[in-house]
Structures are given as structure tokens and as C-alpha cells.
Image (tube, grey):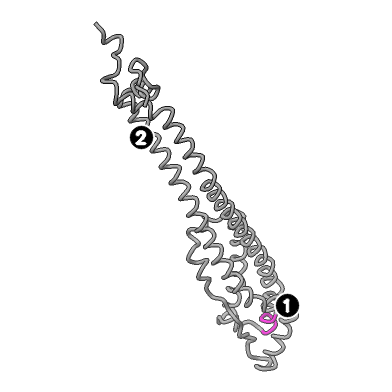
Amino acid sequence: MIAADCAHVPEIIALFSIGGSTFWGLVAAAVAWIVKNIVGWIVWAIQRERDRYDLMKALLAEITSNSVTEALYLDITAASRLTDAIRRDVGPYQPLEPYVALVEKNAVFDNIVESITILPTKVIAAVVDYYNASAGLTKQLQDFREDAFRRLSQARQQQAIRNLFALLGPAVDATSPRARTAISQRMGASRIIGGLGLAAGLLAAFVGVPLLCSAGSRVTALYITPAVEWASTCPSAPRKATDMP
């Protein structure tokens, strides 16, 4: 091993001697704070995207399930068939009170409505449009069971049933596919983002780590090793000019 030149102070020791331990302690703390916050933001972003995906997956399942029942109210000709069948059953003087399939609650949407802002704006708009239309359909179906509906004339009851099939059913039919499409597209984008993130992580592992190791070896050889040899060989650093008599 070549003896260290005590007259020549290694760059890294000279650098640390400029600001003193307090200065470099503050620098180290600042760097640590920045790194911690960057890592924390990355973890937060990943968790937020996962929460979004799980939320959209649940909403998609609920909307798809509701659509099976709501599809019963899309055919305007079915309204006439329904009222004619009821009139034949109850006669001309009893209320046309249809027994209808009803989705009274939306467990997923009702539970996440307070945190829906986590979803992208386009998805929120499509989902809210669908649930508003679905709520209107549900409210009308519930009205068929109320006394106020039973007291109407058969002609007005028949018109109310026709309006449900002519207006509310198509409104749900228009908003449901848009909501499902918006959710499916955003879930696809999330999967792409996740795949790219995984690919980037693998690339960093197979390329970045060896590069960092190589760079660390060069830094050690060029700066750390000479500084260690100098510190272990030379008794003390040269005094500053202001310290000399």
C-alpha cells in the first residue's frame, strides 16, 4: 500500500472541513427528509391507485347486477302488456298495482359515497348519472305500492306505468353502459400503470442496482479509500493559516 501524502488533504476530508459537522449534519437531515417524503409519496400514490381500483371493481359489479333487474323496464310495449294483464286479473275497478322487481338499496354506492372523490372526475360523473337515474326508477317503483297511487283512476295509473317504461327505464339504460364503460376503461388504465410500474421496478433492480454498485465502488476507490488511508496515517490535518502563529 502506497503511503499517504499528508501534505495533500483528500477532497472528501477538505469538503467536510469547510462547513463543519453542524452544517453537514443539517445537509444530511435535509436529504433524509426529502428521501423520506419522496418514498412516502410513492407509497401513498400506489395505495391510492389500489384503493381506486378496488372501489371501481365493486361499483362495476353492483351496476352490472342492477342492470339485470333494470332491463325489465326498457321495452315500452311491455307496459301495455303489463297493464292489460293486471286489468284482466283485478277487473276494471281495482287499482292497477303492479308487482315489480325492485332494487331498493345500493350497498356499494351507499357505503362509498362519502369517499367517491378518490375516483377520477370522468368516472364520478358517469357513476353519479347512473345512480341518479336508478334512484328515479326505484322511487317510481316504490310509489306503485303507495296509497296515493292506488287512489288514482286506472287511466292515470296506466299512464304512470307507461311513463316508467318510456322515460325512466331508457334513462337508466343510457347511463348504465356509460358508467360501466368509464369504470372499465379506468380500470384498464390502472392495470397498464401497474404493469409499467412493475416493469420499471424490475428494470431498476436488474440495471440500476448494478450501476449503483459500480458507481459506489468507483467513489470508494477514488475518495473513501484515500481519505481513510490519510486519516489513519497522518496524525492531524494541516492547521488553517489563521491558526498558525
Question: Which mark sits nearer the N-terminus, 1 or 2?
Answer: 2
The amino acid beneath tag 1 is Asp
Give the total of numbered labels.
2
Which numbered disc, 1 or 2, marks the residue closer to the eye? 2
Most common secondary structure along the magenta stretch: helix
Q: Out of 195 and 144, give the one closest to the viewer.
A: 195
Pick the quarter of the image with the C terminus.
Answer: top left
Q: Position of residue 188 (x, y in %)?
A: 62, 59
Pick the quarter of the image with the N terminus.
Answer: top left
Relative to 145, 3 lies left or right: left
Q: Residues within 10 Å of mark 2 (few under 14, many from 20)?
A: few
* CA distance for labels 1 and 2: 69 Å
Q: Is residue 86 above or below residue 228?
A: below
Q: Which residue is mark 1?
A: 75
Q: Residues within 10 Å of mark 1 (few under 14, many from 20)?
A: some
Q: Position of residue 20 (x, y in %)?
A: 31, 23
The amino acid beneath tag 2 is Ala
156 within the magenta span: yes
Q: Out of 29 and 12, give the one closest to the viewer.
A: 12
Q: Which residue is mark 2?
A: 29
Residue at coordinates 63% horizontally, 85% vertically from top-left? 98
Q: Is residue 195 above or below residue 64?
A: above
Q: Position of residue 183 (x, y in %)?
A: 61, 61
Name of the residue lying farthest toward the left = 245
Residue at coordinates 66% horizontally, 91% vertically from top-left? 93
Residue at coordinates 73% horizontally, 77% vertically from top-left? 75
Q: Is residue 95 above or below residue 181?
A: below
Name of the residue lying farthest toward the top = 245
Secondary-structure class at tag 1? loop
